[in-house]
Image: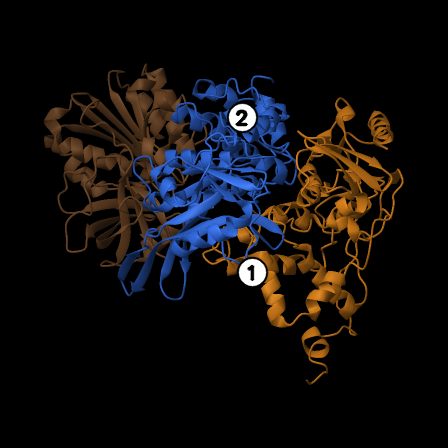
Chain colours: A blue, B orange, C brown
């Protein structure tokens, strides 16, 4: 275990930033979100839920893939470079840290996605325990311990000190020059965090029946129609979600060649599955169902029972109309 | 007030004056509200309180092909949206019973969170003070500090064109609604550009603003057309997001009632209503004060030509007919 | 390293007009030869930068050494562009994607029945020619192919000269939906014709066509005593990545681009009917 006074944090950040890009929760235009750190930025380690999740560090909202130059009947193909510089993402919470494992299941499974793989290889993840979990948090349902976040380095704020523990070689390198501290320095803080998480309103949701075996039963549940009725069909839940990873591939005429890029997409959008001859999910009922079935049934069916939800609770606080995955779990899960 | 509303709704349904009611239900937290249709069997779950900030009128569009009449609960601000939807023939007023409900401003839980209040478990209201219980103790907050932005520059507490009103309202406006627009107008073009770049570059293109907007009622939106060239989701260049919001503001100009839903729903906290309010301010200055949705059947100044109309590009900005 | 999602160049070396709305494009690598090897039933992403990218089944058999062919019906942005292009146009291509028909295992030695409607012949075309080139490895072969009219029958010259050649030892049953002047062959919808032909349920069936045709063919086959485990089809859904990641072609716990597009009907029965 290492330690660092919170007063010295900016100096530590400065040292990191000299060598590599540092991403941290910073406040801009009234919102706290992960962004590139510089001395003039305000870091907000007190804010639990950045408006967007940390997934953008590895799966950016927009990512160039290839550029084409067209000349008569000929085409020149110039693939984009994959990430080739090291970076650090600081202040990732336990839930978002788990989301990286889930994204790995998608992007690092055969065939490996080269862009994602390069970002993962070059990124060092520093996590931060959640001293004050919120009422919208429900990570414990997915075996996540907010007091013991994963990552290359785990960190705890105790009073005016930040304690850091390296979990990997990458992490070791990052914090090796910091002052040594007692291994159990954060134990009291961990206990306090766990005491709160146990009390949270959704600390134990009944996820019974959300598995591949009950796929058709869940799919055909009549509850979907009423559950989805108020759904606006916007992409808010998808875009704030740390595990949603569907993407679109689009072409943009830059005036200097055609830029092909991928960007976040949402199965909640009406055109998601639209083809020339129509769509296989014609109404919001089917689209809404797809999003939650994917997280709670299809994904676990393909991934050893792992749910594609980490309980960060962003969808609970951000859905304009008060819809969210907890509502779905309650309506269709073991407690229905 | 909630109980009075339920009772009245039930009476209306039992008398055969209506078949269902469009209102709100409680979600997973004491503070979240989901728009919902109730019939007489479940009307008891209807919720109306300080958290019903959502404007439900747009849900009536999908209801129109159905048989029977729908009661819709409208706050004063929502009544303008209902009228505007009727003016645009998206809602048939004869199939709607507009039940005005009193309003003293709606609470924005996100605002409490921004104040650093975490783990909210209950809120009790006493006069102008909110007592917020949290997992980490109790906090007192002035009610006006916790209201939705739209309530702070409210159009007034008069329901327009409703069939009846239940409950009292209380003024919540705290100032001139064009104050921020005027501030933006006073900026240099560079400062203003900087402001909007800062705000609009946060856009994640979730389309919540468009999908919730009662004025955005096109069956197929131009941004959903892959052949339009402007249907980008997240754009290749975030500058394009400016275009999405500006085009949207133009499309609803003259029809936007300033209901504030766009800013309420934005997950990125972009003050989108300011774009629309700038349009409203310009329209007011050019053609005289106009409030969209004040009554059914109005023609808004941008579609209503009179010989005395200003020609904005010639007369107004450039300071003279031949300038 | 980026091969699986970054395309390579292809050149369109021949364009054949098959029907009023279907053309067949021959694609080769720049400098000649195939862009990559594939198996019957697999697909490839073709694209014209700036217009879009779309998934098409590879129509030619892997036994063709020098090129790949795609029979494409004009119906959307990309296909419209492809239909107006000229020979020597470069396009981008990536693949092959998906699971092929099990030509080298489950289908070996079996009596085969191919049933196709309209442009649905395109994916089966690859299998049929593969079977023809390895004729000794398979039993009886029957092909039922129907279209709206004679003009809409895809690959008619090839069908008549090659598949209907007695040396091929294949029985071809053509049909069109409505009678017309220059047609003295059979007139019936494909499912009806399948019933009329009274196939015995010892065949392995490969079917592809419009969803409504597939539905009724399945009904007809069931009536004839076929089991779902004997019938294969190939599916089409919106796709973007081709590698089971972008999420678009997800149905149940399957991705059509990766786990399909070839499915056996008993496998489909375990999936939500969202196709």
Residue situated in front as seen by the camera: A169 or B142: A169
Mark 2 falls within which chain?
A: A
- Any mark on residue A37, and which? none
- Any mark on residue B243, and which? 1
Quarter of the image for the C terminus of chain A: give it.
Answer: top right
At 51% across and 42% down in the image, what residue appears?
Answer: A53
Residue B237: percent from left, percent from top: 47, 58
Q: Residue furthest right?
A: B168
Up/down of B128 relative to A299, above or below: below
Quarter of the image for the N terminus of chain A: give it.
Answer: top left
- Residues under labels 1 and 2: Cα distance? 42 Å
At 35% across and 63% down in the image, what residue appears?
Answer: A257
Q: Residues within 10 Å of mark 1 (few under 14, many from 20)?
A: few
Q: Which residue is mark 2?
A: A140
Residue situated in front as seen by the camera: A302 or A100: A100
Query: Can the viewer see residue C137 in this picture?
Result: yes
Residue situated in front as seen by the camera: C162 or B280: B280
Residue C45: percent from left, percent from top: 31, 45
Residue B26: percent from left, percent from top: 71, 30
Task: Give SS at disc 1.
Answer: helix
């Amino acid at each position: 275990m290492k330690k660092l006074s919170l007063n010295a944090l900016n100096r530590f950040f400065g040292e990191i930033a000299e060598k590599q890009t540092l991403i941290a929760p910073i406040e801009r235009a009234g919102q706290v979100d992960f962004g590139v750190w510089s001395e003039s930025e305000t870091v907000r380690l007190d804010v639990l839920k950045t408006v967007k999740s940390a997934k953008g560090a590895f799966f950016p909202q927009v990512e160039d893939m290839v550029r084409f130059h067209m000349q008569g009947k000929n085409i020149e193909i110039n693939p984009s470079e994959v990430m080739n510089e090291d970076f650090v993402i600081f202040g990732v919470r336990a839930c978002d840290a788990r989301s990286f494992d889930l994204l790995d299941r998608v992007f690092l499974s055969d065939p490996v996605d080269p862009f994602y793989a390069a970002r993962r290889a070059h990124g060092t993840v520093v996590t931060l325990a959640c001293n004050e979990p919120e009422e919208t948090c429900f990570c414990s349902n997915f075996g996540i311990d907010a007091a013991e976040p994963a990552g290359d380095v785990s960190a705890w704020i105790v009073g005016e000190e930040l304690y850091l523990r390296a979990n990997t070689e990458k992490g070791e390198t990052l914090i090796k020059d910091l002052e040594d501290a007692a291994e159990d320095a954060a134990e009291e803080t961990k206990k306090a965090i766990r005491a709160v998480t146990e009390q949270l309103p959704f600390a134990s949701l009944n996820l019974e029946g959300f598995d591949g075996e009950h796929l058709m039963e869940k799919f055909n549940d009549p509850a979907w129609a009423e559950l989805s009725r108020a759904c606006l069909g916007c992409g808010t839940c998808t875009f704030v979600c740390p595990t949603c990873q569907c993407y679109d591939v689009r072409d943009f005429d830059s005036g200097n060649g055609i830029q092909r890029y991928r960007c976040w997409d949402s199965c909640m959008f009406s055109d998601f599955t639209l083809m020339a001859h129509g769509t296989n999910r014609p109404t919001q009922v089917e689209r809404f169902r797809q999003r939650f079935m994917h997280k709670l049934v299809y994904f676990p069916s393909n991934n050893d029972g792992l749910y594609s939800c980490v309980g960060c609770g962003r969808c609970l606080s951000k859905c304009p109309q008060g819809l969210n995955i907890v509502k779905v779990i309650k309506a269709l899960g073991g407690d229905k | 007030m909630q109980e009075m509303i339920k009772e009245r709704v039930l009476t209306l349904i039992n008398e055969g004056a209506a078949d269902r009611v469009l209102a709100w239900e409680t979600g997973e937290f004491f503070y979240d509200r989901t728009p919902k249709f109730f019939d007489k069997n479940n009307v008891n779950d209807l919720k109306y309180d300080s958290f019903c900030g959502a404007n439900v009128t747009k849900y009536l569009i999908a209801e129109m092909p159905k048989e029977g009449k729908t009661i819709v609960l409208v706050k004063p601000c929502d009544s303008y949206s209902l009228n505007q939807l009727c003016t645009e023939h998206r809602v048939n007023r004869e199939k709607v019973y507009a039940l005005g409900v009193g309003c003293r401003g709606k609470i924005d839980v996100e605002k409490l969170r921004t104040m650093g209040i975490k783990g909210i478990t209950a809120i009790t209201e006493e006069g102008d003070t909110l007592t917020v219980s949290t997992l980490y103790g109790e906090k007192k907050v002035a009610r006006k500090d916790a209201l939705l932005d739209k309530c702070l520059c409210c159009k007034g507490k008069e329901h327009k064109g409703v069939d009846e009103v239940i409950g009292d309202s209380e003024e919540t406006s705290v100032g001139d609604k064009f104050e921020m627009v005027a501030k933006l107008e006073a900026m240099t073009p560079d400062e203003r550009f900087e402001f909007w770049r800062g705000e609009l570059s946060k856009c994640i293109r979730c389309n919540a603003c468009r999908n919730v907007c009662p004025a955005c009622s096109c069956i197929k939106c131009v941004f959903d057309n892959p052949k339009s060239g402007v249907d980008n989701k997240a754009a290749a260049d975030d500058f394009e997001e400016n275009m999405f919001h500006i085009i949207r503001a133009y499309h609803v100009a003259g029809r936007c009632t300033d209901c504030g839903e766009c800013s309420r729903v934005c997950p990125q906290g972009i003050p989108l209503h300011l774009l629309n309010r700038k349009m409203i301010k310009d329209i007011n200055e050019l053609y005289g004060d106009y409030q969209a949705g004040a009554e059914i059947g109005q023609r808004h100044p941008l579609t209503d030509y009179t010989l005395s109309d200003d020609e904005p590009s010639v007369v107004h900005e450039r300071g003279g007919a031949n300038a | 390293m980026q091969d699986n999602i970054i395309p390579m160049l292809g050149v369109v070396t021949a364009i054949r007009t098959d029907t009023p709305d279907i053309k067949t494009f021959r694609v080769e690598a720049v400098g000649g030869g195939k862009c990559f090897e594939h198996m019957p039933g697999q697909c490839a992403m073709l694209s014209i930068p700036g217009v879009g990218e779309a998934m098409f089944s590879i129509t030619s058999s892997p036994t063709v050494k020098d090129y790949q062919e795609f029979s494409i019906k004009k119906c959307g942005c990309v296909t419209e562009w492809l239909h107006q292009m000229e020979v020597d146009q470069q396009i981008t291509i990536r693949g092959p994607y998906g699971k092929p028909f099990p030509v080298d295992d489950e289908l070996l030695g079996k009596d085969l029945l191919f049933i196709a409607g309209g442009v649905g012949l395109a994916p089966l075309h690859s299998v049929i020619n593969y079977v023809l080139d390895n004729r000794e490895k398979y039993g009886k072969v029957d092909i039922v192919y129907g279209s709206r009219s004679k003009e809409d029958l895809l690959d008619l010259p090839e069908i008549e000269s090659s598949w209907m050649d007695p040396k091929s030892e294949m029985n071809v049953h053509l049909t069109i939906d409505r009678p017309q002047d220059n047609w003295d062959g059979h007139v019936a919808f494909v499912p009806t014709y399948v019933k009329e032909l009274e196939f015995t349920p010892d065949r392995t069936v490969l079917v592809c066509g419009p969803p409504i045709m597939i539905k009724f063919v399945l009904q007809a086959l069931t009536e004839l005593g076929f089991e779902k485990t004997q019938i294969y089809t190939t599916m089409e859904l919106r796709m973007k990545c081709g590698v089971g990641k972008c999420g678009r072609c997800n149905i149940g716990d399957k991705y059509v681009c990766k786990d399909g597009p070839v499915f056996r009907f008993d496998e489909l029965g375990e999936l939500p009917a969202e196709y």
